[in-house]
């Protein structure tokens, strides 16, 4: 998430009431999670296991809960609770805005686009030309939808990411300040849920088609011309490359990559990154051709045992 204008390190420290290491006028341009940080961004870290990863990342400001040596060319924000203060920044720069209208006055809707009754279109939403948005769709704030997109009834674009920190009193949610961005010529079936990014964008590429009842987690990137069948659950921070086919009831782990033109057969569990151009099946995920050979071999075990008995 980029800020509407550059801020100084001192200004950011004042917003969240923290100490800082660096010059007062050190430039701060945005905030992001570790996997999408760029120069000028703030990243937060609150566990020693990830200190080095954060300090060595592309982020130039590290919100951290320990006094450490500041890397050259970077700055630090010292906090007793970086998770809490990262949430404070999200609330400051991307606060929740209530709506008084079914279609927000700040939304931009393209030519020849049809929005059916009982659909909600939030603040600062952009919808392109020649789209059909069916009834009872909810499009949360800041969502971007391209041209020639069809979205069927009951779908929700832009709900919060499923991201929590366990505390003694319960679970504390990491607030979502990102967006959902839908490309051109995308079809989204009924009752799909596509969560917005925590700080970045959840993206669906041009020409991709989603069946009914599909969950897409926060910050996931789906490429161009993919086909995804019903009841598939895609976790957060997944990368699905172009022209991937995923059949029904597939589930994925978070943070994995599915290579271009891969085919994942029904009810598979994608527990790890997989190469493109191959067909996969099963849980944990395996290349289908090899897994079917293995199963064929297992079926021979009773016959082999009978043959061994005859040799005694």
Image (cartoon, rainbow, N blue to C red):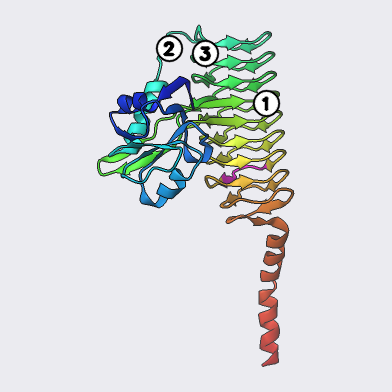
**Along the polypeptide, which appears first: circle 2 or circle 1?**
2
Name the mark nearer the viewer: 3 or 2. 2
**Residue 40 image position (x, y, % from top left):** 48, 31
> In terms of secondary structure, where does tag 2 sit?
loop
Q: Nearer the viewer, residue 259 or 5?
A: 5
How far apart are labels 3 and 2 at the CA level? 14 Å
**Residue 146 image position (x, y, % from top left):** 65, 20
* Residue at image mark 2: 99
Please rate how many residues cluster around mark 3, counting C-alpha atoms within 10 Å: few if below 14, some from 14 to 19, many from 20. Answer: some
Name the mark nearer the viewer: 1 or 3. 1
In the image, which residues are magenta?
246-251
Q: Residue at x 70, y 56 (%)?
A: 288
CB under 8 Å between discs 1 and 3? no
- Any part of residue 296 in sight: yes
CB under 8 Å between discs 2 and 1? no
Does 162 lie within the magenta span?
A: no
* Residue at the bottom extreme, as displayed: 312
Q: Residue at x 72, y 33 (%)?
A: 225
* Residue at image mark 1: 186
In the rendered image, the vertical position of residue 100 relative to residue 183, given as above or below: above
Helix, strand or loop: magenta stretch:
loop
* Residue at image mark 3: 118
């Amino acid at each position: 998430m980029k800020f509407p204008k550059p801020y100084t390190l001192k200004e950011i420290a004042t917003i969240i009431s923290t100490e800082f290491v660096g010059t007062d006028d050190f430039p701060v341009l945005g905030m992001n999670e570790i996997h999408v940080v760029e120069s000028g961004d703030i990243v937060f870290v609150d566990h020693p296991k990830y200190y080095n990863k954060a300090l060595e990342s592309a982020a130039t400001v590290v919100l951290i809960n320990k006094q450490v040596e500041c890397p050259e060319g970077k700055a630090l924000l010292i906090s007793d609770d970086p998770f809490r203060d990262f949430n404070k920044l999200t609330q400051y720069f991307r606060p929740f805005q209530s709506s008084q209208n079914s279609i927000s006055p700040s939304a931009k809707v393209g030519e020849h686009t049809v929005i059916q009754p009982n659909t909600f279109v939030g603040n600062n939403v952009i919808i392109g030309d020649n789209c059909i948005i069916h009834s009872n769709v909810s499009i949360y704030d800041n969502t971007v939808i391209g041209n020639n997109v069809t979205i069927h009834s009951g779908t929700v674009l832009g709900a919060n990411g499923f991201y929590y920190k366990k505390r003694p009193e319960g679970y504390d949610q990491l607030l979502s300040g990102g967006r959902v961005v839908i490309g051109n010529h995308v079809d989204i079936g009924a009752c799909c849920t596509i969560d917005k990014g925590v700080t970045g964008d959840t993206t669906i590429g041009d020409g991709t088609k989603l069946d009914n009842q599909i969950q897409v987690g926060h910050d996931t990137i789906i490429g161009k011309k993919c086909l995804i069948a019903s009841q598939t659950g895609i976790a957060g921070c997944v990368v699905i490359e172009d022209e991937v086919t995923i059949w029904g009831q597939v589930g994925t782990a978070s943070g994995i990559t599915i290579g271009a033109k891969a085919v994942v057969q029904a009810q598979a569990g994608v527990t790890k990154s997989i190469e493109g151009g191959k067909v996969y099946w099963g849980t944990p995920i395996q290349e289908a051709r090899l897994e079917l050979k293995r199963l064929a071999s297992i079926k021979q075990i009773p016959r082999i045992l009978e043959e061994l008995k005859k040799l005694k």
